[in-house]
Image (cartoon, grey):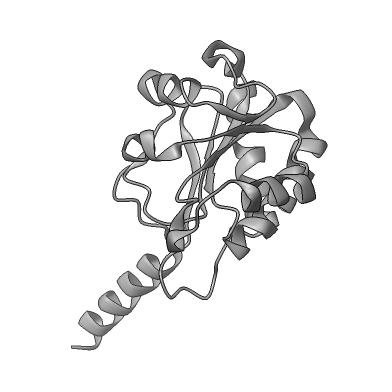
Amino acid sequence: MSALRWIVGALLIVLAVSPLRAEEIALDEARLTGLAELPPLRGEGFAPGSLAGKAVVVTFFASWCPPCHVEFDYLTKAKTAHGDKLEVIAVNIYEQFGNFTGTERLARFLDRKDPPFTLLGEGEAVKDLFGDVTRVPTLFVFDGEGRPTLHFVHARGAKKTHVAYDELEAAIQEALMATAS
């Protein structure tokens, strides 16, 4: 009986410290094409071929989402630190939540944050390509081959509302290392 308890206890520990992934979302041609077809919110969009060999962050955000504000600060810091080795693509989604209409709230958010990365609108058109994004922020980090190194979702009722900067940086470093090899 004690051996069974030990095995169950060990299994529970492994499950508690190991991230479980129902499906690994890769940054494949269909997802890249879907993203490239979205309209830019500011500046230009991107060409899928321009991402080759780079670490890529794709995040889904809304201007009304408090955790997205913090995440944008982290993404700006990461983009500044890694420069051309990192591409960040922020996709606006669910902006009209709460029966809000107009673009003033989004414009104020973008003016305040002034992000140095790609901003795309109409994210609802691609959310199903990324595993049916239903919450913001939802963030992915991919290596230069499109393999995932991080997938974070702000789960309903969770105490952790956004990716921590050290987690983001570790995933970017993993992506850069995989890209370099």
Quarter of the figure with residue 83:
top right
* Location of residue 82 in the rendering, given as x and y in whole percent from the top left corner: 77, 33
The x, y position of residue 77, in whole percent, is: 78, 46
The residue furthest front is: 102
Asked if one can make out residue 175 in the rendered structure from this viewpoint, the answer is yes
Q: Is residue 158 above or below residue 111?
A: below
Q: Is residue 24 visible?
A: no
- In this rendering, the answer to whether 35 lies above or below 71 is above
| Position of the C terminus by quadrant | top right
Tell me if residue 18 comes above or below residue 131 in the rendering. below
Q: Residue at x 53, y 26 (%)?
A: 39
Q: Residue at x 32, y 45 (%)?
A: 132
Query: Horizontal and vertical percent for residue 143?
Result: 55, 30
Relative to 79, 13 lies left or right = left
Count of numbered labels shown in the rendering: 0
Q: Which quadrant of the figure contains the N terminus?
A: bottom left
**Viewer-side residue, 2 vs 20:** 20
Q: Quadrant of residue 2?
A: bottom left
Residue at the outermost left position: 1
Of all residues shown, which one is farthest toward the bottom?
A: 1
- Residue at the image position 56 percent from the left and 14 percent from the top: 47
Q: Residue at x 49, y 55 (%)?
A: 136
Question: In the image shown, does 92 or 48 lie closer to the viewer?
Answer: 92
